[in-house]
């Protein structure tokens, strides 16, 4: 004990004489406190000050020291230790303990009937945006399919009209060649020229 006290006094004198930094002084003081506490333990003195005992335990374990009120809260809290859904179908039976024993401040056993609750789905802004984009994509796809179908129908109609014009042109060519009068030949030739102009416009529209 006297040796420990002398160590503490020597550390204080060294702080004053050598001009130690604050960090060095704190380290020396902590070492002196630990030595003092160890000396008390060797002497069989257990009624160490609360502050010294807390500092020693914290240094030894590295764990956070709880206050009495905090310890009391964790010790007295109500904890669910069991859930039973088989004994009584359609119900859930919960068992509650406090301080390791069946709770006495509240119901130790609680039975609740299982209910099906139907509610409205809550969507976040990202989900709503994704839904709007999905609907817009479906609209665009439907419009593209409509345009494709219209283009296919137009192509088929142009093909039918072109085939009919070809048949009519071949007929007019045959009649032109078989006509005896020049005026009749000129009339059929005018029909043939008109058909050729129509076919050119159809080709331009298709391309």
Image (cartoon, helix red, strand yellow):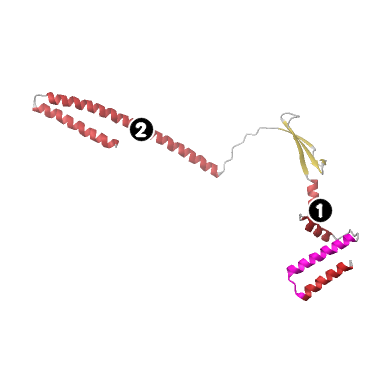
Task: In the rendered view, tell whether residue 90 sits above or below residue 100.
Answer: above
| Residue holding disc 1 | 68
188 or 32: nearer the viewer: 32
Q: Whole-percent x and y of residue 163?
A: 26, 27
Image quadrant where one finds the N terminus: bottom right
Q: Whole-percent x and y of residue 174?
A: 16, 24
Task: In the rendered view, tell whether residue 128 sits above or below residue 61.
Answer: above
Residue at 20% from the left image edge and 27% from the top image edge: 169
| Residue holding disc 2 | 150
Label 1 SS = helix
Q: In the rendered image, which quarter is residue 173 located in?
A: top left
User: Callout 2: 10 Å neighbours few (<14), some, many (20+)?
Assistant: few
User: In the drawing, does residue 77 fall left or right of residue 191?
Assistant: right
Ranked by sequence position, the earlier of labels 2 and 1 is 1
106 or 57: nearer the viewer: 57
Query: Which residue in the rendered view is the most extreme toward the left?
Result: 181
Q: Is residue 28 magenta?
A: yes
Residue at 23% from the left image edge and 33% from the top image edge: 198
The magenta region covers: 18-42
Give the distance between the C-alpha atoms of the residues marked 2 and 1, in whole angstroms: 83 Å
- The kind of secondary structure the magenta stretch mainly shows is helix
Q: In the rendered image, which quarter is residue 47 located in?
A: bottom right
Q: Is residue 125 magenta?
A: no
User: In the drawing, does residue 186 fall left or right of residue 52?
Assistant: left
User: Callout 1: 10 Å neighbours few (<14), some, many (20+)?
Assistant: few
Residue at 51% from the left image edge and 43% from the top image edge: 129
Give the number of callouts: 2
Label 2 SS = helix
């Amino acid at each position: 004990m006297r040796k420990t006290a002398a160590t503490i006094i020597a550390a204080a004198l060294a702080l004053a004489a050598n001009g130690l930094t604050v960090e060095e002084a704190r380290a020396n003081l902590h070492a002196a406190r630990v030595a003092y506490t160890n000396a008390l333990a060797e002497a069989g003195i257990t009624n160490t000050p609360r502050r010294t005992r807390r500092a020693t335990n914290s240094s030894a374990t590295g764990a956070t020291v709880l206050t009495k009120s905090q310890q009391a809260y964790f010790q007295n809290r109500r904890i669910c230790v069991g859930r039973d859904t088989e004994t009584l179908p359609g119900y859930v039976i919960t068992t509650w303990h406090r301080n390791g024993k069946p709770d006495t401040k509240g119901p130790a056993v609680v039975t609740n009937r299982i209910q099906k609750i139907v509610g409205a789905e809550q969507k976040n802004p990202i989900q709503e945006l994704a839904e709007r984009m999905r609907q817009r994509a479906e609209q665009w796809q439907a419009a593209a399919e409509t345009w494709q179908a219209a283009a296919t129908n137009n192509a088929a109609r142009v093909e039918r009209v072109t085939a009919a014009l070809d048949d009519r042109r071949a007929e007019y060519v045959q009649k032109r060649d078989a006509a005896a009068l020049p005026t009749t030949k000129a009339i059929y030739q005018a029909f043939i020229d008109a058909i050729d102009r129509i076919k050119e416009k159809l080709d331009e529209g298709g391309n």
